[in-house]
Image (cartoon, helix red, strand yellow):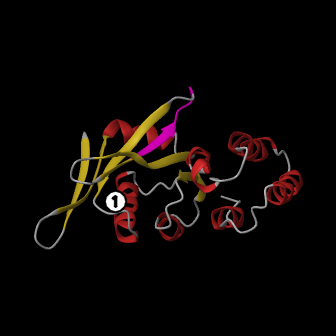
Amino acid sequence: MEFFNSIDVDNIGRLRNVVWLHSHCKAAYKQFHDAICFDTTYLVNRYNMTCATFVGINHHRHPILLGCALMSHEDINSYKLIFRTWLEAMGNIYPDAIITDQCPSIKPVIAEVMPHTIHMYCICHIFSKLSLYLSGVRPSKIVRGEFKSMVLDSITVEVFERKWTEYIAKYNLHTRNWLNKLYSEKEK
C-alpha cells in the first residue's frame, strides 16, 4: 500500500469526510505512536471543511505527519468515523496518549474509540483563549502571564492547587464558567 484513503459520502453522494495517509505515515506510526496530536485548528477550506492532522514526534524531536482528514462537521459521528478509519489504517495500534483541543465532541469519542489512550488538552489552545475568557480582568497582560506561570511552573499538585485558589481569589474569578470547567478537567 502506497497511499490509503477513505471517503465518506452522505445518502445523495455529497462528500462528508475523508481520511488519507501515505505508507510512510504508517511505518513512522509503528515506531512513534506513544503520543500524537490531533489538530483541527489548522485550516478550513472554501467548502467549510475542516482540515485535521495527526502528528507525532520522532526520535529527533521533529514532528512527523501521521495522517490527515477533511471533515464536514466537527460532531461525534464525524470524529468516530475519522478516528476509527485512521486507527484501522494504522493496524489498530492505539496511541498511548493523544492531545487535542477542547472540542466537546472529541472527549466522548476518544473515551469510546480509544479507551486505554490518555487524552490531554493542548496547552497552546488553552493559552490562546485566555484573552477571550479573561477579558475585562485588569491588568490583562499580568493576569494572563500569571495564569501561564501557574500552569507551567507548578511542580506539584499541591503547589498548583494553592496557586489556583490564590489566583481565583486575587482576581475574583469564581463566576467564570470557562475557568471552572477548565479546573474540573485539570487532569487533561
Residue 1 seen in the figure: no
The image shows residue 160, relative to residue 14, as above or below, that is: above
- Residue found 41% across the figure and 42% down from its top: 66
In the image, 66 versus 26, the foreground residue is 66
Residue 166 seen in the figure: yes
Judge from the rendering whether residue 77 lies leftward or rightward of residue 115; answer left or right. left
Question: Residue 31, position in %: x, y?
Answer: 51, 39
- Residue found 51% across the figure and 70% down from its top: 108
In the image, 153 versus 32, the foreground residue is 153
In the image, 111 versus 178, the foreground residue is 178
Judge from the rendering whether residue 178 lies leftward or rightward of residue 146; answer left or right. left
- Residue found 88% across the figure and 56% down from its top: 162
Say which quarter of the image contains residue 145. top right
Mark count: 1
Question: Residue 174, position in %: x, y?
Answer: 76, 67
Judge from the rendering whether residue 179 lies leftward or rightward of residue 103; answer left or right. right
Say which quarter of the image contains residue 180. bottom right
- Residue at the left extreme, as displayed: 12
Label 1 Cα neighbours within 10 Å, binned few <14 / some 14-19 / many ≥20: some
Tell me which segment is drawn in magenta: 53-60
The image shows residue 113, relative to residue 86, as above or below, that is: below
Answer whether residue 13 is magenta in the image: no
Type of amino acid at the residue the image marks with label 1: Thr
Answer whether residue 59 is magenta in the image: yes
In the image, 98 versus 39, the foreground residue is 39
Circle 1 residue: 85
Label the magenta part by its dominant secondary structure.
Answer: strand
Question: Residue 14, position in %: x, y?
Answer: 14, 64
Q: Could you say whether the residue bearing mark 1 is in a helix, strand or loop?
A: helix
Judge from the rendering whether residue 160 lies leftward or rightward of residue 124; answer left or right. right
Image quadrant containing the C terminus: bottom right
Question: Residue 139, position in %: x, y?
Answer: 73, 44
